[in-house]
Amino acid sequence: MSVIKVQELEKSFRIPHEKRTTLFETLTGMFKPESYEVFNALKDINFDVKEGEFFGIIGENGSGKSTLLKIIAGILYPSSGEVHIRKRVTPFLELGVGFQSDMTAVENIKTYGTIMGMSKHDIRSRTDDILEFAGLEKFRDAKLKNFSSGMQVRLAFSTAIQTDPEILLMDEVLAVGDMDFQQKCLDVLNNYRKEGVTIVFVSHDLGAVRRFCDRTLLLHKGEQIALGSTAEVIDRYVYGDQDKSISEPVSCVVENDPVILTDEQPPVACSRWGDQKIEISNVELYDKFGNLSNRFNSFDAMTIRIMYHAHKKVFDPVFGIALYSEKGENVYGTNTELKEIEIDSVEGQGHIDLKIESISLLSGRFLLTVAIHSRRHEPYDWHDKLYHFDVIPTSRDAGIFNVPCKWII
Ligand SMILES: Nc1ncnc2c1ncn2[C@@H]1O[C@H](COP(=O)(O)OP(=O)(O)OP(=O)(O)O)[C@@H](O)[C@H]1O
């Protein structure tokens, strides 16, 4: 049975061209009609959510996720289309809205619980549980203005989860709080799932969406781009319509004097150097579907293609790559010589591929160096950290790269 049904939903906002803030502007503008433009934040959205389903909504910033959730919550009205809701909706959208800084924790639980729809009796009987879950038992009579922002969010979340939700709408709630508290929230979500609560979950944390959501909706500039199994929709988001151009190498003076590279002395002044006997004409990254991409799920396959132009016949060239974290830490490096690949000679145009079966990087932006040099390490063309790509997490492990391991009890 579907508990949320959204049909042909549209939402547009009026954005005024000029804002009248002063009395003078108001008086002089009195007889001038206010001009505005219409911004379509949601266009022809259609989906339903079944009872007990964990439903994800993902998309770039500004794609309309929060607007959609607010319409389902009844906070915003749609411009056209229909939204049918079959059960009680509890929105966890802006946690803590309504908190009063001059009131104590207990007083705030009372007002916030009331806003969230709890009865007086429930609030009274659950106040201790709320404070305990938030880890704030000792602060029950302290004024909220003395709480850190993390403590305030914990108090709001702990109050909100006492509302016995039937349909829960969550907007980036997991992004707040420290790791311990986030884990508590995840445990709560798991319990809700077991209890059959329907959850609509908006998040940029694709790892969490992948773990929790049965189905997912992808929005792009207010349009419904994909709806279906979470893994497929995340693939569509990660590998789908995005800016396919791999970051262009920054323009840089090419050092024509051959530089002998040593490990101790990397030249830092220029990000490209070499005598250009063999020139790197382009570098392309391909995803597991064979499409150009600069975004990859961790553990997915990736191919790095180095396109070159050898202006004359060059014997024994070595092709290499190095990966760096965004902070510049060297994560990995390899070349054809280290892998004992003999390349007798190259001449004219060609390309060489490095196939990575599974990217062992966990999450974040990584910089890529691509280089061609001689066996004596004289650089022909060295593109130092000129390229980058992003890795989207698929596991919950921490750090930069994966270490295959297991716990044995
Ligand atoms: N009240 C409003 N008036 C005018 N424009 C609005 C209003 N609310 C939202 N918008 C616009 O609608 C678009 C969608 O916003 P929304 O907050 O729903 O996106 P989002 O996908 O949740 O983004 P984010 O991931 O950054 O939270 C944005 O361009 C936003 O500026």
Image: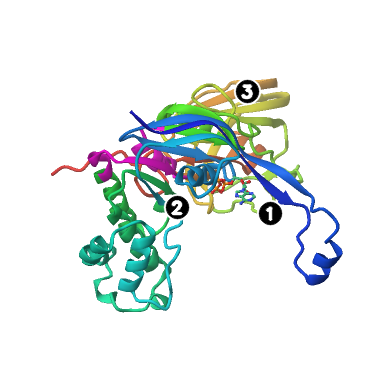
For marks 3 and 1 on the same chain, the one whose residue lies earlier in the sequence? 1
Callout 2 crowding tier (Cα within 10 Å): few <14, some 14–19, many ≥20:
some
Q: Identify the residue position indicated by label 2 in the image.
A: 93
211 in the magenta segment: yes
Please state which of residues 303 and 15 is positioned toward the viewer in this rendering.
Answer: 15
Disc on res. 269: 1
Q: Position of residue 2 (x, y in %)?
A: 37, 30
Q: Where is residue 5 in the image (x, y as percent from the top left)?
A: 44, 32
**Residue appearing at x 26%, y 49% in the figure:** 187
| Quarter occupied by residue 377 | top right
Q: Of circles 2 and 1, which is in front? A: 2
Residue at disc 1, secondary structure:
loop
203 in the magenta segment: yes
Q: Where is residue 160 in the image (x, y as percent from the top left)?
A: 34, 57
Q: Are marks 2 and 1 in contact (CB under 8 Å)?
A: no
Highlighted magenta segment, given as a residue range: 192-215
Q: Identify the residue position indicated by label 3 in the image.
A: 351
For marks 2 and 1 on the same chain, the one whose residue lies earlier in the sequence? 2
Residue 140 in view (yes/no): yes
Type of residue at label 2? Leu
For marks 3 and 2 on the same chain, the one whose residue lies earlier in the sequence? 2
**Residue appearing at x 42%, y 68% in the figure:** 99
Q: How is the image coloured?
A: rainbow
